[in-house]
Image (tube, grey):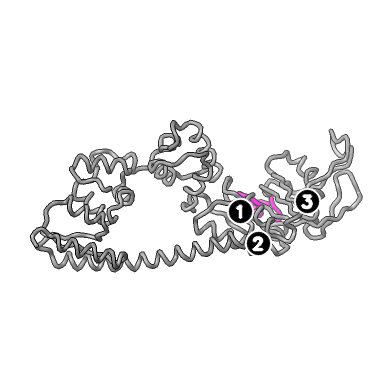
Amino acid sequence: TTSGEEGVALFREIRRRHPDMPVILLTAWTHLDAAVELIKAGAADYLSKPWNDERLITTVTNLIELGQANRALNQRLQRERKAKRELEQNFDLRGLVWQDPATERVLTLACQVARADVPVLITGPNGTGKERIAEIIQANSQVASGPFVVLNCGALPSELIEAELFGADAGAYTGASKAREGKFEAADGGTLFLDEIGNLPLAGQMKLLRVLETGRFERLGSNRERQVKVRVISATNADLGAMIRAGSFREDLFYRLNVIELRLPPLAARPGDILPLALSFLRGKTLHPSAESALQAHAWPGNVRELKNVMARASLLAQGDVIKALDLGLPLAPSLAQSSDTEPDRDAIVQALARAGGVVAQASADLGLSRQALYRRMERLGIARPA
């Protein structure tokens, strides 16, 4: 019929029976609002009569390719969700929040090596969560019930690091009025995590190598040999290979520490983790779409530590329960700073809505606008606002 009611009814019945089947509308209607309403109902695209055969073939081809890509994506997502469930069910992940496949690969390897009594070296930039990975290795190891002792080799003067590691007898150095236990003794039967291992002085490196080889050491100022059973996990953000070439790190110690290496990527290289982590740091608040865009666009040079601080500040300073982009104190995403003279026209918006199946959030991302900006633009252009 000229009203198109029969075609609309057929379309709705097809959608009811086969919700995943893409449907192209061929219509003589010139009202874009009506087309948008049908796209909102699930139409994949629409072509006006009389249609162009070449455009029709291109549209069908694109939908077939899109369907194949979506099926492949869904299969990959299903595999990733299954792997995530298995990790969470089979291992103690210490409450770690993650979603990105790059993090999953690190976690999988960490859990695989946890039961092996070998040293592990965790590398990666500051603030990426290296200590948390070490905690996960300890929690799933054969010494999970033993102590987990941490020493940041970069937080102490070089002359005190050896005393922290191996302990000291009274009078071993100025101010040592009584004997003190070192980290190796404290970690006996468990795990010692040496953060920023590249800051360990050469003399300390030699003693550490001996402990790794024999399990024996002496306190500073003592000749009595002590025996311990400790698993050592070390971490660094330094290029140990360059330090070896410069003579500031022992090559034999490097190979002792680096039986298994876990490379933890920077946060910017695992974008799937950004929003889940941000939400985990919030205190009863939610994220506005503009905040989500700003978080995903930021480079995060300070990694997870920076993200945690940003969310803590935003939670305290935001007005209301919804955190917006401006509350984060980050540079706005380019799409949010887009000037009005580059805003999309009516046809571009309708086409974006068609590609997004009427989902405004997806269409706005495609157009480089926030969802609210797209709504305002649709209102100015007289495009019906989807429910």
Left or right placement of residue 265 versus residue 26 in this view? right
Dot 2 falls on a residue whose secondary structure is strand
Q: Residue at x 26, y 48 (%)?
A: 386
Q: Amino acid at mark 2?
A: Ile
Q: Earlier in the sequence, mark 2 or mark 3?
A: 3
Q: Does residue 341 lie above or below 366 as drawn?
A: above
Q: Does residue 294 lie above or below 94 as drawn?
A: above
Q: Residue at x 73, y 38 (%)?
A: 157
Which residues fall within the magenta stretch?
235-250
Location of mark 1 (residue): 123
Dot 3 falls on a residue whose secondary structure is loop
- Residue 381, percent across and down? 18, 42
- Residue 121, percent across and down? 66, 56
Gap in angstroms between the C-alphas marked 3 and 1:
22 Å
Q: Residue at x 51, y 58 (%)?
A: 102
Q: Residue at x 54, y 41 (%)?
A: 308
Q: Earlier in the sequence, mark 3 or mark 1?
A: 1
Comparing labels 3 and 1, the label whose residue is closer to the camera: 3
Report if the CB atoms under discs 2 and 1 are less than 8 Å apart: no
For the N terminus, the quadrant is bottom left
Q: Amino acid at mark 1?
A: Thr
Give the tally of numbered discs.
3
Dot 1 falls on a residue whose secondary structure is strand
Location of mark 3 (residue): 187
Q: Amino acid at mark 3?
A: Ala
Label 1, residues with CA under 10 Å away: few <14, some 14-19, many ≥20? many
Location of mark 2 (residue): 260
Residue 277: mark in rendering: none
Left or right placement of residue 41 versus residue 323 in this view? left
Q: Earlier in the sequence, mark 2 or mark 1?
A: 1
